[in-house]
Amino acid sequence: MISRRELLRLMAATGAFAPLGAAGWRRAHADDDEDGGEADETVGKAYLIRGLAALARAHEFRWNVGHHGCAVIAGYYLGRENDLAPGALRGIADHLDRFIRHRAKFMPDEPIRGDGGASVEPILEALAETVGSLRSGGHDAIYGSLALRALQDAPEAATPEVIDGVRRLLRRFEREVSVEEPSEHHRSYPMTPYREVDDIVAATLDAVLRPWSHFVKGTPTSAGNVVHWVTHADALVTLRELGHVELAEKAGAAHQQYINHPIESAEPGDPPAPPALTDWRAPAYWVSDDPRVIQKGSWFFGHSFKLPYSLLRLLGRVDDPERRAEVLERAILLPELFR
């Protein structure tokens, strides 16, 4: 029987983690809810709009409520970008539906009203004032980048109300979350500033692969922080992809402060027991209850969508199949520390 590690390496070597091909893009982008196709085989644009609406309303509650709208947006892109089998797409859509019901208080049912096409400049201005400083895992960059990406792909949803709602969320985050001071290690051994996307990806994956003995709850290298190293890195990549290079460079300083910690022990430590299902791209994973149960049935507070979305995007930029397999194996085990 093939081992889990061998299976991951085989998938990596055959391009299973590569960016979406043209045929897969056409299939994933078939607007089934508009064109009369089989709606249960795709993650349609309605999820993108629903996530945006929730993100724009989050400021009415607490800054961390932004996780919920971002989770739905990430789930949408997870289904659109990875050339997934129909069974996986149906599973993602089902989990998104259940997640939306689970967080119904924060998920507005009413459609977005008003004229689209409003400028995203208020969001960019809010980000420019915060992303250079590290606050709670870089959620300003994470929220803002996902909102900007969604607004680019759904310009009809770029109403003044939605733009202002995202801006207000970023301002609330700034008011309520304190700036974290750099560690002595980071001041003494600063990293070379990121110059391109490959720098962001390489540094992040190196950090993720530190010894398991470092993954201690309540420390700067806890599993929760490591998850956000990945989602924060993807936010920088997204900002660059959208053309906001200066903003991404500014945010890069905060990300480097976040991930730059010494490796104080060569002891490997013991990883958690692997889950039964170890492939985020497989239908078996998404038709199971595994995505939901992490962190008390909260879909890992939305990270059951956000972590695979961000991690697979980063891995799509890695050429070495061995490295892709090693990182994926590590990342799949991280949620197990929250069961």
Image (cartoon, helix red, strand yellow):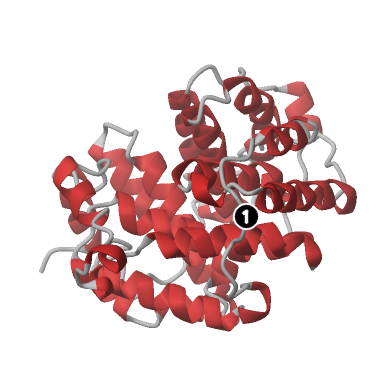
Residue 117 % position (x, y): 56, 40
Q: Nearer the viewer, residue 240 or 158?
A: 158
The residue lying at 78 percent from left, 45 percent from top is: 135
Q: Quadrant of residue 296?
A: bottom right
Residue 132 % position (x, y): 75, 30
Q: Is residue 179 above or below residue 113?
A: above
Quadrant for the N terminus in the image: bottom left
Residue 183 visible in the current orientation: yes
The residue lying at 61 percent from left, 78 percent from top is: 103
The residue lying at 79 percent from left, 50 percent from top is: 168
In the rendered view, does 337 fall on the left or right side of 59? Answer: left
Q: Secondary structure at mark 1?
A: loop
Residue type beneath disc 1? Gly
Label 1 Cα neighbours within 10 Å, binned few <14 / some 14-19 / many ≥20:
some
Residue pushed farthest front? Answer: 115
Q: Is residue 250 above or below residue 46?
A: above
Residue 270 visible in the current orientation: no
Quadrant for the C terminus in the image: bottom right
Q: Nearer the viewer, residue 107 or 156?
A: 156
Q: Quadrant of residue 320?
A: top left
In the rendered view, does 319 fall on the left or right side of 119? Answer: left
Residue 71 % position (x, y): 53, 62
Q: Label 1, on which residue?
A: 114
Residue 73 % position (x, y): 50, 57
The residue lying at 36 percent from left, 70 percent from top is: 92
Q: Is residue 95 above or below residue 281?
A: below
Residue pushed farthest left? Answer: 1
